Amino acid sequence: EVQLEESGGGLAQPGGSLRLSCAASGFSINNYEMSWVRQAPGKGLEWVSYISGSGGTIYYADSVRGRFTISKDSAKNSLFLQMTSLRVDDTAVYYCARCRASFFDSWGQGSLVTVSS
Amino acid sequence: SYVLTQPPSVSVAPGKTASISCGGDDIGSLTVHWYQQKPGQAPVLVMYYDSDRPSGIPERFSGSNSGNTATLTISRVEAGDEADYFCQVWDSRSGQHVVFGGGTKLTVL
């Protein structure tokens, strides 16, 4: 069974940093593209970042480029999102999602990130 | 940047048919995917490549895509179908890569 479990969310101050983790099970992240998608409270879905199976191709949304870094650890079968220079409008539930070509076929339950002073 | 436009809300009586639209410039040239999200839960894929259903999704769910509009159709609507529905495309042309529609709240009367 495919499972994705996010962790690392919490409260951060504006300008601060947080690192999200996503532990995958039931499949190898080496064989799949992965993404982070976020959802601000009461709002819609917003794609954040993508990493290819090999890790050689990475994309970011304009809203986070230069502040967020996606990475993965094959040994831990985990995906990460390092978030720096956090802003109030980064407040959201962050989901990791497994990509198949151009869509997301599995999602984690999400990790809440709150940026507030 | 590429924009996908969905109606904020759609209401339908039980047993009737609901149609949720997703508009975009020449969206018919892209492949559209749909997700269902119930309160407090993660999104679930309900349609991919315009009209393919993942295993476990009822046949009551169908999709189409042509011209400037993609549509998710739910036949014989049930109370359990009440949820937010989001369309999504992968658009490398714009540099955004992944674009979601704003979402449609489906209310079962």
Image: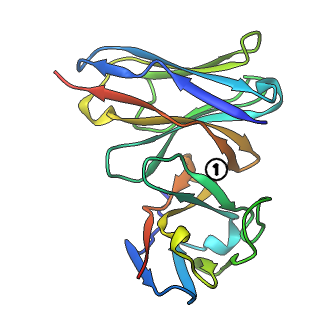
Q: Secondary structure at mark 1?
A: loop
Q: Residue furthest left?
A: A117
One can see residue A66 in this view? yes
User: At which x and y percent is residue B30?
Assistant: 68, 65
**Which of the 4 image quadrants contains residue B67?**
bottom right
Q: Residue at x 61, y 53 (%)?
A: B44
B18 sits to left or right of A56: left
* Picture layout, residue B37 above or below residue B24: above
Q: Quadrant of the C terminus of chain B?
A: bottom left
Tag 1, which chain?
Answer: B
Would residue B24 be seen by someone viewing this image from the given angle?
no
B62 lies above or below A54: below
Image spot of residue B80 (x, y percent) = 54, 68
Q: Name the residue at 43% across, 53% down.
A: B39
Residue A70: horizontal and vertical position, in percent?
Answer: 57, 22
In which quarter of the view is residue A97 placed? Answer: top right
Q: Is residue A11 above or below residue A50?
A: above
Q: In the picture shown, does residue A113 fall above or below B17?
A: above
Query: Can you tell which quarter of the image residue B71 is in?
Result: bottom right
**Residue A54 in picture, x, y percent from top left:** 79, 24
Amino acid beneath label 1: Ser
- As rendered, which of B42 and B67 lies closer to the eye? B42
Colour style of the rendered protein structure: rainbow
Residue bearing the label numbered 1: B92
Residue closer to the observer: A44 or B109: B109
Which residue corresponds to the image point at 29% horizontal and 18% vertical from the top-left?
A12
